[in-house]
């Protein structure tokens, strides 16, 4: 299928912000195609969460202490963060109370 530049430009101007974000992630190789199932874990280890946010673990703990993210305790001393909470924080949907 050959796509014309005018069609691409028109699609960009009429797409929702969510669709634009998803398309940009795919074009930049940061995610798989839309037809691939979401294989991302629901809960992330602290190191994974810090890497996803591109911050140090110390900074991540400061964000948690400030109430911007809520940790999930699996068992004493073992914590995880919800991927959805992290993505909401990045989008600006989560605010400290």
Image (cartoon, helix red, strand yellow):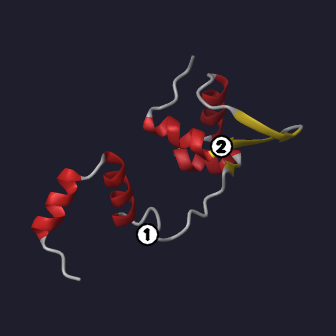
* Residue matched to label 2: 82
**Quarter that holds the C terminus:** top right
Residue 16 vs residue 34: left or right?
A: left
The answer to whether residue 55 shows anywhere in this view is: no
The residue to which callout 1 is attached is: 33
Q: Nearer the viewer, residue 9 or 55?
A: 9
As measured in the structure, the alpha-carbon distance from the residue carrying label 2 to the one carrying label 1 is 23 Å
Residue occupying image coordinates x 12% and y 69%: 5
Q: What crowding class fits label 2: few (fewer than 14 Cα within 10 Å), some (14-19), or many (20 or more)?
A: some
SS state under label 2: strand
Where's residue 85, x and y in %? Answer: 59, 38
Question: Residue placed farthest to the right in the image?
Answer: 76
Q: In this view, does 67 lie to the left or right of 80?
A: left
- The percent coordinates of residue 22 (x first, y second) are 38, 56
Depth check: give the residue in front, 12 or 48.
12
Label placed on residue 59: none
Horizontal side of 62 relative to 30 (left or right) equals right
Tell me what residue is drawn at x 65 percent, y 29 percent.
64
Residue 72 vertical placement versus 26 (above, below): above
| Residue shown at 61% from the left, 46% from the top | 83
43 over 79 or under it: above or below: below
Residue at the image position 60 percent from the left and 45 percent from the top? 50
Q: Residues within 10 Å of mark 1 (few under 14, many from 20)?
A: some
Label 1 secondary element: loop
Q: Quadrant of residue 72?
A: top right
Instruction: Specify the quadrant that holds the N terminus.
Output: bottom left
Q: In this view, does 93 lie above or below 1?
A: above
Relative height, residue 26 to residue 45 (above, below): below
Residue 81 appears in the picture as rendered = yes
Q: Which of marks 2 and 1 is nearer the N terminus?
A: 1
Counting labels gives: 2
Which percent across, then down, holds residue 80? 73, 43
């Amino acid at each position: 299928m050959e796509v014309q530049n005018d069609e691409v430009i028109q699609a960009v101007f009429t797409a929702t912000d969510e669709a634009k974000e998803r398309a940009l992630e795919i074009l930049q190789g940061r995610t798989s195609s839309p037809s691939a199932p979401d294989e991302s874990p629901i809960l992330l280890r602290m190191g994974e969460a810090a890497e996803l946010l591109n911050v140090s673990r110390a900074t991540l703990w400061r964000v948690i202490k400030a109430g911007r993210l809520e940790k999930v305790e699996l068992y004493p001393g073992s914590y995880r963060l919800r991927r959805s909470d992290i993505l909401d924080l990045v989008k600006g949907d989560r605010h400290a109370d």
